[in-house]
Each structure stands twice: as C-alpha cells, then as structure tokens.
Image (tube, rainbow, N blue to C red):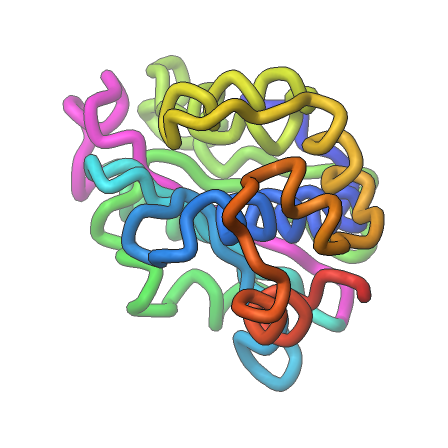
Amino acid sequence: MVKLPSIANLIQRTKALAALDLVLSPELQYRYYSFNSAWSSSERMASMRDGCGNEWWMVFHESGWAALKGLGHETPAWSKGREALSMAIQKQFPPEFHGFANESAFRWDSTSFGYFHLPTSAGWSYANSTTPFSSLDSGDAELLRHLVGGADDYALFAIDYYEIDVQVDVVESVFSLQPITQAALTKLKPEAKLDKISQELFTEIGYPR
C-alpha cells in the first residue's frame, strides 16, 4: 500500500506531471502523464499509461471524493488474480463511487490495485486490503512513485525515457506550480515554444497562468 498525500496535493502533483510530459513530449502517444481539468462537469481526471500495458486512472470529484485504479500487468497480483482480482477490487468501492467504479473507459476488467478517499475520511483506503489477493504485489508502489517521490526521481526518469537533460530545479518549480514562462520552457527543453502548448497547458490541464 502506498501512502498517498492529500487530494489537494495529488491534484497539484498530477497537473505538474502532465505539464512536464507535455513540454518534454508534445506528441500525446509518447507521454506517460495526462490531466483533464474538464473530464466532466463535476470531475477532473488524471492518468498514466506507459505504453507497455501498465496504467492508472484517477478522478477528483467536486463533492470532495477522489478515487484511483490501476494495472501493473506483470505483477504477482495480476498474474494470479486477473478477472477475479479486478472484480474483487471493484466491489470494494463504496456506493459514492458508483460512477467511477463502473466507468468503461477505465478498463475495470484489467485492474490490479485501487484506492479511494471519501470527503469525510482522514486518508486513503486501499481497496486490495480486503480482497483474497491482499498479500500480493499489485504494482502500485512502482506505478505511483512519481505521485509521492521527489523532483530528483522524476528528473532521472525523464532523462532516461525522453533522453534529454532535465534539471531538478526546473522540475521542483513545476511541482510547486510556479508560472511556466518561455524562459522556464527553454531551460527545460530548448526547442519548446509556449505558444504551441499554451492551449493544452492552461485550458485542458488547468495549469495556473
């Protein structure tokens, strides 16, 4: 089980990750992270897909709840549980999460871990903990590491994945949602142009201007 931060901190981090990936990879199909600030009239949605079958989806509802589900497709939990594991996790979500737990876009037949946070709860609940597969590694620690790790960890990932020199201080600035100017973009990726990404950055992701 991963010790996830508050909903507010997760919104900030997932927006930052989506913004960084937008700058480093303008082509959507090669990005890990995305954020949709208008997933629905009442929800924002963050996601991660690595192109190798691993993924997660997270929804933040205006009423104060949040939920997360994901798949580590090479993990012991998925190898052993598969559809039985997916169904067991899905059933652990309280009635408040009915829309999330039945959203076809989130591929509920392929799920190895889940988390949910009620508006009245002090923290996150791990849906796997009450399933028959609770003792098996579900892949959450690896796939959620950029939600809880530092700027240095993301920078090392980006250097390896995007094959570009990513400076930790720039990542730290974006993690704290500091304004992204052309000067900041140039420091992160010299050929990046703010006018080419501003629509997605400020409107879809909702990064603060």
Q: Nearer the viewer, residue 8 or 63?
A: 8
Q: Specify whether 20 is left or right of 172.
A: left
Horizontal side of residue 183 vs 200, given as left or right:
right
Q: Is residue 39 above or below residue 131?
A: below
Q: Quadrant of residue 195?
A: bottom right
Residue at screen point 38% across, 31% down:
162
Q: Find out whether residue 72 is within the magenta segment.
A: yes
Task: Tell me, yes or no, if residue 186 can be seen here.
Answer: yes
**Nearer to the camera, 54 or 19:** 19
Visible in this render: residue 93?
Answer: no
Q: Measuring 57% from the left and 26% from the top, which residue is drawn there?
A: 166
Highlighted magenta segment, given as a residue range: 63-84
In percent of width and height, residue 204 lies at 58, 72
The structure residue drawn at horizontal position 40% and vertical position 35%, both measured from the top left corner, is 113
Q: Nearer the viewer, residue 130 or 13?
A: 13
Task: Indicate the position of residue 174 as horizontal and vertical percent values.
Answer: 73, 41
Q: Is residue 125 left or right of residue 136?
A: right
- The answer to which of 182 and 10 lies nearer the viewer is 182
Q: Name which quarter of the figure residue 103 lies in.
A: bottom left
Return the x and y of residue 39 as percentages of the image width and height.
Answer: 53, 75
Q: Is the N terminus in the top left, top right, bottom left or bottom right quadrant? A: top right
- Percent from the top left, x then y, of residue 165? 52, 23
Q: Is residue 110 magenta?
A: no
